[in-house]
Image (cartoon, rainbow, N blue to C red):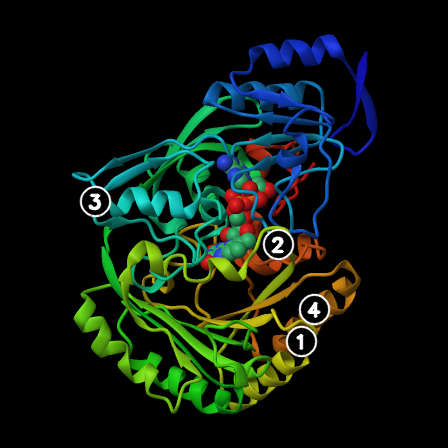
Amino acid sequence: MELRILTSGGAETALEESVIGAFEGRLRGDLLRPGDAGYEEARKVWNGMIDKRPALIARAASVADVMNSVNFARENDLLVAVRGGGHNVAGTGTVDGGLLIDLSRMKGIRVDPEQRTAHVEPGVTLGELDRKTQSFGLAVPLGVVSETGIAGLTLGGGLGWLRRKHGLSSDNIISVDVVSADGRFLSASDEENPELFWGIRGGGGNFGVVTCFEYRLHPVGPEVMFDFVFYPGERTKQVLRSLNEFMTQAPDEVSPVGVLGRVPHDETFPEEWHGEQFVAILAMYSGEVEEGERVLRPLRELGEPIVDFSGRMPYVEAQAVLDEDYPEGGRYYWKSHNVNGLGDEEIEHLIAHAEAAPSAHSTIDVWYQGGAMGRVGAAETAFGDRGAPILLGIEANWEEPHDDEANVTWARECVSDMRRFSDGGMYLNFPGFMEEGQKLMQEAYGQNYGRLVALKDEHDPANLFRLNQNIKPTA
Ligand SMILES: Cc1cc2nc3c(=O)[nH]c(=O)nc-3n(C[C@H](O)[C@H](O)[C@H](O)COP(=O)(O)OP(=O)(O)OC[C@H]3O[C@@H](n4cnc5c(N)ncnc54)[C@H](O)[C@@H]3O)c2cc1C
């Protein structure tokens, strides 16, 4: 018996059952083949656009399992994907015909409230980590949807409601444990393997499989003030102008996102507004609740709202307010671009694109940057330049396969049009399908790209870890 499987170069090869059996015998977790119970569930990722069938899924239960899997992949020259939470929008957390190393069962979390640190395994989701750290009144800056995996999010940067107060998720890594392409178990921090540590903070899964993240924790919550207010689309220009003005004076505690979209057919919104354009402001205040209520109030008084869901709420709840908007198995294509600001002309273009969206679920998100995340120098971490005041997230979200082309085209056209307002730069966790290849990497990493190639040459010259935001090694 033998199994057909793809090599790193994409050619088909045969693996003897005895070779696979020996690998399986070394795993504490399990090894799934097509047809096995649990395989269909295990092969799925969040984005319904991605429908891939790995030849083997190694569900790692320990660091030793990860080392065994990496060694097995390298020794047999296999095409390999690595999965944390399975939420990568480009679907890099799976592979057709190759080996998937699935870390989603590695869910250990150890919080040290005295030192304000947390050691976290790579299968943990944002919500799981938030719930644990909040039992001590602490938090790691993470993203804004609780079901996302901490691993891919952190390795690519990590933008959330605490970004202007405490930086990106990756800015809050103290150290990592990594299984490298040659199967070694390394630690990386400012003191140990500092260049690898530099590359891990924004460089994605290029340099090895991270088996533990040590994060810095911050006092947050347990309650926070959260603004979540929807205004009529016809007021978009005034609302975004006011938000711009507000941000010229705003403290770092405020990390808002402006959203352009269409009111859902949902009973929590007044029926007469269903399907109409809206502009929304979402912002958490990461400080004392009463102060947050006062500071954020002006953003709730920009005219008569369609609906205002703002209020004080537990931090873990605020971290999940958007969960329902992103059901697993929906179809998604997200791109992003930095812009230098939002003047009237930029806003007019955004309004036109929002109105042209083929799907009522799609949005254009205006992420205000700066604050703590902006104070980290471009060369300090692999993530690169953070100078742009605003990141646009263009989210095409839809349901039916026959609408794929229209929605993907809409997002691409929007990004391509908004480039005129930018000095460059984008966010690799909102990467489309990374169809631009190395051009996209060069654009995202800017002056850090060459240093990343050198690091890739050192740690993964054969590009074993290639199904990711891939930095191509020189060879
Ligand atoms: C609903 C939703 C909401 C989101 N919201 C935000 C947000 O608010 N802020 C934000 O910044 N981003 C956000 N994102 C984007 C998110 O950061 C990326 O999609 C990220 O890749 C998800 O991580 P994951 O572990 O779930 O992904 P996976 O698909 O499991 O992994 C993505 C890639 O990361 C690498 N990887 C994963 N684990 C490891 C590991 N342990 N070691 C080495 N490499 C690894 C692999 O290359 C893998 O292909 C969101 C995504 C979704 C789907």
Can residue 453 be seen in the rendering of this structure? no
Q: Which of marks 4 and 1 precedes in the sequence?
A: 1
Measure the C-alpha gap from mark 3 to mark 1. Answer: 43 Å
Mark 3 and mark 2: Cα distance apart in space: 38 Å
Residue 368 location, x and y as percent?
42, 71
From the image, tell me which residue sits under label 3: 136
Question: What residue did someone put label 1 on?
Answer: 357
- Left or right of 77? Residue 305 is left
Left or right of 136? Residue 32 is right
Point out which mark residue 412 bears: 4
Amino acid type for the residue under numbered disc 4: Arg
**Quadrant of the rendered image containing residue 225:** bottom left
Quick check: 375 above or below 26?
A: below
Which numbered mark, 2 or 1, is in the foreground of this view?
A: 1
- Answer above or below: position of 309 versus 304: above
Q: Which residue is mark 2?
A: 441
Q: Residue at x 58, y 81 (%)?
A: 350
Taking the spot 34% from the left edge, 57% from the top edge, the residue there is 317
Q: Quadrant of residue 406?
A: bottom right
Q: Amino acid at mark 3?
A: Phe
* Circle 4 SS class: helix
Cα distance between the residues tagged 2 and 1? 27 Å
Element under label 3? loop
